[in-house]
Amino acid sequence: MECTIKWLEDGMSFLAQTSTGHLVAMDGAPEAGGNNLAPRPMELVLAGTGGCTAFDVVLILKRGRHNVTGCDVSLKAERAESDPKVFTKIHFHFRVTGKGLKPEAVQRAIDMSAEKYCSASIMLAKTADITHDFEIIEG
């Protein structure tokens, strides 16, 4: 995996190009010289972690032949007060929609992601206390 980051020479804006050819803009906070035109890099780390685990949960449920029709996850994180301002706590709240989903199946999918498959959350667990909960929505 590779990525190239280019400073846009205007404040603290950067453009990342991934190895798959996608572009992602990043910007700093105004108090750090940014223009608030794009997400902060650490926001993207958190978003990527949410995407990684949601991907896993949906895939695990589908492979288990569960009738999952939707999945979203909200993440709330706390960071250290001093540099490096690593994540110290992250809570994941999953809302999984489907027909006849069993709580034990959803819990198993979340646990498998957290313990085995989600590289991002497993990496962040080295510095952060990570917790999860979920709700099932019939539909």
Image (spheres, rainbow, N blue to C red):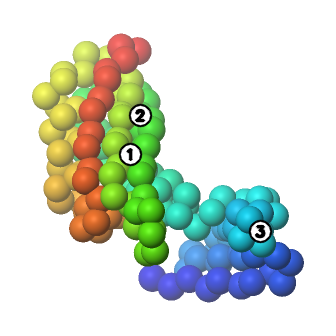
Looking at the rendered structure, the kind of residue marked 2 is Cys
Decide: few, some or many residues near mark 1? Use Cα within 10 Å; few <14, some 14-19, many ≥20.
Answer: many
Looking at the rendered structure, the kind of residue marked 1 is Ala
Front-lying residue, 111 or 13: 13
Decide: few, some or many residues near mark 2? Use Cα within 10 Å; few <14, some 14-19, many ≥20.
Answer: some
- Looking at the image, the residue that sits furthest to the front is 82
Give the residue at mark 2.
Answer: 71
Residue 76 shows in the view: yes
Pinpoint residue 133: horizontal percent, then vertical percent: 27, 33
Image quarter of residue 7: bottom right
Which numbered dot is residue 34? 3
Contact flag, marks 1 and 3 (Cβ < 8 Å)? no
Residue 68 shows in the view: no
Image quarter of residue 27: bottom right
The numbered mark, 1 or 3, whose residue comes first in the sequence reads 3
Pinpoint residue 138: horizontal percent, then vertical percent: 36, 14
Give the residue at mark 1.
Answer: 54
Image quarter of residue 74: top left
Q: CA distance from mark 2 to mark 1?
A: 7 Å
Pinpoint residue 127: horizontal percent, then vertical percent: 28, 66
Decide: few, some or many residues near mark 3? Use Cα within 10 Å; few <14, some 14-19, many ≥20.
Answer: some
The answer to whether 109 is drawn above or below residue 18 in the figure is: above
